Image: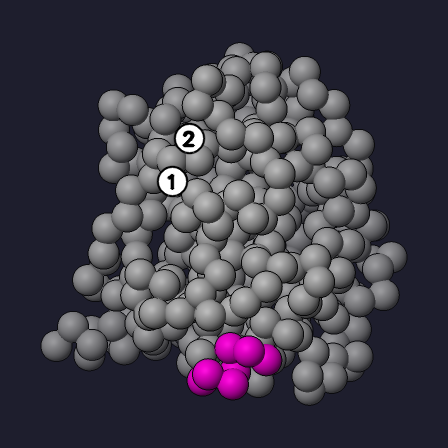
């Protein structure tokens, strides 16, 4: 009965995406460049001109060949920057991010049109995917390894990076690696439980849990994600990229399947611009289901909170993340 209900739910997500397609206005279409073996990146964004140079370059380095982007009302030069990129196809919308399932309805429609048969990376503009030996072995190597083992999805933990001292004190220049400005992370305060409904591993913890959600840990951000999928028509994300349907696509960690590697999404939310962005987000009420519950969270960011503590660990590449069990090598040997 559970499986039947989830099949119906997946069909509803696909129907929602079909209905929401009318909210998208095609701006730049370069999808004719997409070749059968290409790895694609899907992203919804708003006002990310500061992060875009690094975001694009990093994922190009990994092996992304085309970016399918939905811009949700940027006014900071993001649109002009994206239009100048030869490997970007761009759609624009001014409709509600929250009412589109936080952009997933729009991306689902585009994945239905362009993703089938491709490995598709679905991430936010403040996320950078890494995995064991990523500097030397690109996504083509990783997806080839997965395909040889008939594995269609790849999991990652979202890892918040932050500076030492007030958030506004560490400057950042567009194009720089954000991990140079945000050099610290929480290494060991994570908890994992099994989600029987979606057969996924539910992961919470890290700096936002420690600082903002001590009194209500159940409200802390979900960190498990399934960002990389060999797409088929009929697939759908449920909540952001935290869960997928069919459920077998959520079997992505070595605690679920022996020998699977996993990655980390380096999260650069806490750049020195976070205070102004938080004030804007609090006013727009577009980023959380129950936005009123997050007023104190936003206010702390506006007030330039210091997230560092004695237990913070300095980010020094992927190897220590394996040691901290935030990333797994599995049978993918470096």
Q: Quadrant of the C terminus?
A: bottom right
The answer to whether residue 54 is above or below residue 285 is: below
Q: Going 29% across and 24% down the picture, which residue do you hit?
A: 214
Is residue 146 shown in magenta?
Answer: yes
Front-lying residue, 281 or 159:
159
Q: Where's the N terminus, which quadrant?
A: bottom left
The mark found on residue 159 in the picture is none
Q: Give the residue number, with chain letter if any, for mark 1.
A: 221
Q: In screen coordinates, is 128 left or right of 248?
A: right
The residues bearing labels 1 and 2 have C-alpha atoms spaced at a distance of: 7 Å
Q: Residue at horizontal 70%, vertical 57%?
A: 135
Residue at left offset 46%, top offset 46%: 323
Quadrant housing residue 213: top left
User: How crowded is the residue under tag 2: few (<14 C-alpha within 10 Å), some, or many (20+)?
Assistant: some
Q: Is residue 172 above or below residue 164?
A: below
Q: Which residues are magenta?
A: 144-150
In percent of width and height, residue 259 lies at 40, 69
Residue 128, placed above or below residue 204: below
Dots 1 and 2: beta carbons under 8 Å? yes
Identity of the residue drawn at 62% across and 30% down? 183
Q: Which residue is mark 2?
A: 208
- Local secondary structure at mark 1: loop
| Residue 131 falls left or right of residue 299 | right
Q: Give coordinates of residue 144: x percent, y percent.
A: 59, 80
């Amino acid at each position: 009965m559970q499986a039947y209900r989830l099949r119906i739910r997946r069909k509803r997500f696909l129907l929602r995406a079909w209905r929401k397609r009318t909210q998208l206005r095609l701006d730049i279409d370069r999808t004719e460049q997409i070749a059968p073996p290409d790895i694609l990146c899907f992203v919804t964004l708003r006002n990310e001109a500061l992060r875009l140079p690094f975001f694009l370059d990093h994922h190009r380095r990994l092996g992304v060949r085309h970016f399918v982007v939905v811009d949700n009302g940027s006014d900071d030069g993001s649109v002009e920057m994206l239009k100048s990129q030869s490997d970007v196809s761009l759609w624009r919308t001014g409709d509600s991010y929250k009412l589109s399932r936080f952009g997933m309805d729009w991306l689902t429609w585009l994945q239905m049109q362009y993703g089938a048969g491709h490995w598709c990376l679905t991430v936010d503009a403040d996320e950078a995917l890494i995995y064991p030996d990523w500097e030397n072995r690109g996504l083509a190597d990783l997806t080839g390894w997965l395909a040889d083992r008939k594995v269609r999805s790849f999991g990652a933990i979202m890892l918040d990076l932050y500076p030492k001292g007030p958030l506004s004190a560490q400057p950042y220049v567009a194009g720089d690696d954000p991990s140079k400005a945000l050099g610290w992370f929480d290494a060991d305060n994570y908890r994992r439980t099994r989600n029987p409904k979606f057969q996924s591993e539910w992961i919470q913890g890290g700096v936002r849990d420690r600082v903002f959600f001590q009194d209500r840990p159940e409200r802390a951000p979900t960190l498990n994600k399934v960002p990389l999928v060999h797409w088929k028509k009929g697939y759908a994300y449920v909540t952001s990229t935290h869960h997928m349907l069919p459920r077998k696509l959520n079997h992505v960690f070595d605690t679920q399947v022996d020998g699977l590697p996993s990655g980390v999404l380096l999260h650069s939310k806490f750049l020195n611009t976070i205070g102004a962005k938080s004030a804007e987000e609090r006013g727009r009420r577009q980023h959380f289901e129950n936005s009123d519950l997050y007023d104190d969270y936003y206010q702390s960011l506006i007030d330039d909170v210091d997230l560092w503590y004695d237990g913070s660990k300095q980010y020094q590449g992927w190897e220590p993340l394996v040691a901290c069990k935030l990333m797994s090598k599995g049978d993918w040997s470096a």
